[in-house]
């Protein structure tokens, strides 16, 4: 490429592709475990918050399919913080959280919410993780194919 040429601007396409794939992944995961999209969003909001501190440090820690962070390492997230992160009003948020607790997807720990590690050993959750992984790989390949430049 000469200095006068610029790479194709694929930002809008990249966002469209990513948005489509992210929704498809969440929908497939939700369907696999019998959740609706809001339940899946809340559950995902909880478990990602519980384990976000584990993203730092050792890259391979809890990386394998059946290598789960123990409950003792899961940090509870308060309802208020989760509602703010997910931009959900209390009247929508509260009944969904209670249903997820009743179904065993979430637990109250102190003043916060935790997605217990036992949930992730359920056969449907393992299938959901595998489906999610396939979706992430597909997204990555598609973004590479359209020439997304991560440095741009």
Image (tube, rainbow, N blue to C red):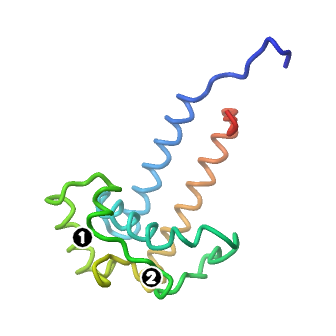
Q: Which mark is residue 53?
A: none
**Residue occupied by mark 2:** 122
Q: In the drawing, does residue 121 fall left or right of residue 56?
A: left
> Hey, which residue is sitting farthest right in the picture?
2
**Residue occupied by mark 1:** 97
In front of the other: 97 or 142: 97
Q: Residue at x 53, y 38 (%)?
A: 17
For the N terminus, the quadrant is: top right
What x and y, as percent, mark residue 31?
37, 63
What x and y, as percent, mark residue 89?
19, 55
Q: Earlier in the sequence, mark 1 or mark 2?
A: 1
> Hey, which residue is sitting farthest top in the picture?
4
- Total numbered badges shown on the rendered structure: 2
For the C terminus, the quadrant is: top right
Q: Would you place residue 55 above or below residue 65 in this image?
A: above
Marks 1 and 2 close (CB-CB < 8 Å)? no
Q: In the drawing, does residue 133 fall left or right of residue 85?
A: right
Q: Residue at x 29, y 51 (%)?
A: 87
What x and y, as percent, mark residue 44?
41, 65
Quarter of the figure with residue 115: bottom left
Q: Would you place residue 142 above or below residue 105 in this image?
A: above
Q: Residue at x 29, y 58 (%)?
A: 38
> Hey, which residue is sitting farthest left in the picture?
91
Q: Residue at x 32, y 63 (%)?
A: 81
Q: Secondary structure at mark 1?
A: helix
* Disc 2: CA contacts within 10 A as few (<14), some (14-19) or many (>=20): few
Q: Would you place residue 40 above or below residue 18 in this image?
A: below
In front of the other: 95 or 151: 151
What x and y, as percent, mark residue 97?
24, 70
Q: Secondary structure at mark 2?
A: loop
Q: In the drawing, does residue 69 fall left or right of residue 150?
A: left
């Amino acid at each position: 490429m000469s200095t006068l040429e610029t790479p194709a601007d694929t930002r809008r396409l990249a966002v469209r592709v990513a948005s489509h794939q992210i929704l498809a992944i969440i929908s497939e995961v939700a369907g696999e475990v019998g959740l609706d999209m809001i339940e899946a969003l809340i559950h995902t909001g909880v478990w990602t918050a519980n384990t976000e501190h584990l993203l730092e440090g050792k890259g391979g820690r809890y990386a394998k399919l059946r290598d789960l962070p123990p409950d003792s390492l899961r940090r509870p997230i308060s309802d208020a913080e989760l509602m703010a992160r997910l931009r959900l009003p209390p009247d929508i948020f509260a009944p969904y959280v209670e249903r997820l607790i009743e179904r065993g997807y979430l637990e109250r720990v102190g003043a916060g919410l935790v997605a217990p590690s036992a949930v992730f050993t359920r056969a449907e959750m393992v299938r959901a993780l595998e489906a999610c992984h396939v979706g992430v790989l597909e997204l990555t390949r598609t973004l590479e194919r359209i020439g997304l430049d991560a440095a741009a």
